Amino acid sequence: MLRRTIAVIVLLCLASLLCIAGCGKKPAKKIAPQMQQEPTISLFDNKTGQKKDLKIEEYVQGVVAAEMDTKWPVNALAAQAILARTFTMENVKSGRVKQLHGTDVSTSVEESQAYNPDKINDNVRKAVEATRGEVVTHRGNYIRAWFSACDGGVSATAEEGLDFTKEPTPYIKGGVKDGCLSITEPKNKAWEARIPVDQVRAAVKEKAGQDTGPITTAAIVKKGPSGRAEQIKIGQATLSGPSLRLALDSEKVRSMLLSDIKVEGGQLVLTGKGFGHGVGMCQWGARLMAEQGKSPEDIIDFYFKDIAIEKQWK
């Protein structure tokens, strides 16, 4: 009986020591080996109408070259490659482009991602090769691998930045502060857009299906957690910030991280900072972290949570 008691005590002590050594630590991020052959995908060229088959890694090179400055640090390009590859796999799995063109992906940014193989250089090749086969998953499924040019220093949730509510996206970190404004272009630090009210009324009616009536006033009705305009009232119409941005041209109205909105001299005047929806990875933030020596996987971890980075083919 005494021996059995001593044995139990020894086992309990060992268990306690193991817990002290490891229970308080955050599990190390693993790149799980789930090997398959590198996929071949089909691409629709929206300009020429032509279709072609190509290996996914070749396609990812063309996406990275189009979506990010190819002179930037390799680790920033590599983080972009991981997201581009993930975005592609999620898109292929969904069949969204297949329904439109009978292909897996297209060259349209509205349907898929930007694609420009002419801009591929050695930096891009190194970045894609260094992360070959790596994709981001959440509970075994590909994430919506969103990214934007400049989040204005603070990231948004999918609900806030994209008005996206089709499915839960718990892996998106909202409110992340990345310091991107310290290195980004001046036009991302502060911008102004002036659009004639007649043009605004026509655009909102066409794109958002609402008639503003004569536009004499404009106001932010609701702001999200990061400070972005989630609901805006233009004349008599109230619509989401992301919807308004798309209606008025997302290149001109650079973000919904607005400091002011008003009607002045027959124009809708918007001022703000940032460029893009601000959801997921900020490209300028990725560049800053790469310059600080962060790995591609570190950069992805900074903007997403509860994820795994899996190497799915060699």
Image (cartoon, rainbow, N blue to C red):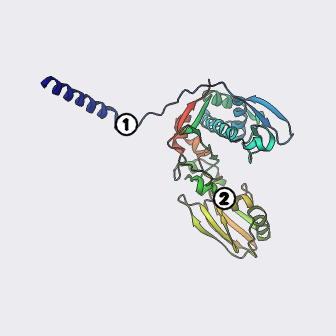
- Mark 1 residue type: Lys
Q: Residue furthest front?
A: 1
3D distance between C-alphas at marks 2 and 1: 40 Å
- On the image, numbered disc 2 is attached to which residue? 242
Residue 206 disc label: none
Q: Residue at x 73, y 63 (%)?
A: 208
- On the image, numbered disc 1 is attached to which residue? 25
* x and y, in percent, of residue 136 in the image: 58, 37
Question: What element does badge 2 sit on?
Answer: helix
Along the viewing direction, whichever of 238 and 201 lies nearer the viewer: 238
Q: Residues within 10 Å of mark 2 (few under 14, many from 20)?
A: many
Q: Residue at x 61, y 68 (%)?
A: 220
Q: Residue at x 57, y 27 (%)?
A: 34
* x and y, in percent, of residue 289 in the image: 54, 40
State whether residue 29 is above or below residue 196: above
Question: What element does badge 1 sit on?
Answer: loop
First along the sequence among labels 2 and 1: 1
Quadrant of residue 296 within the rendered picture:
top right
Residue 98 located left or right of residue 232: right
* x and y, in percent, of residue 268 in the image: 72, 69
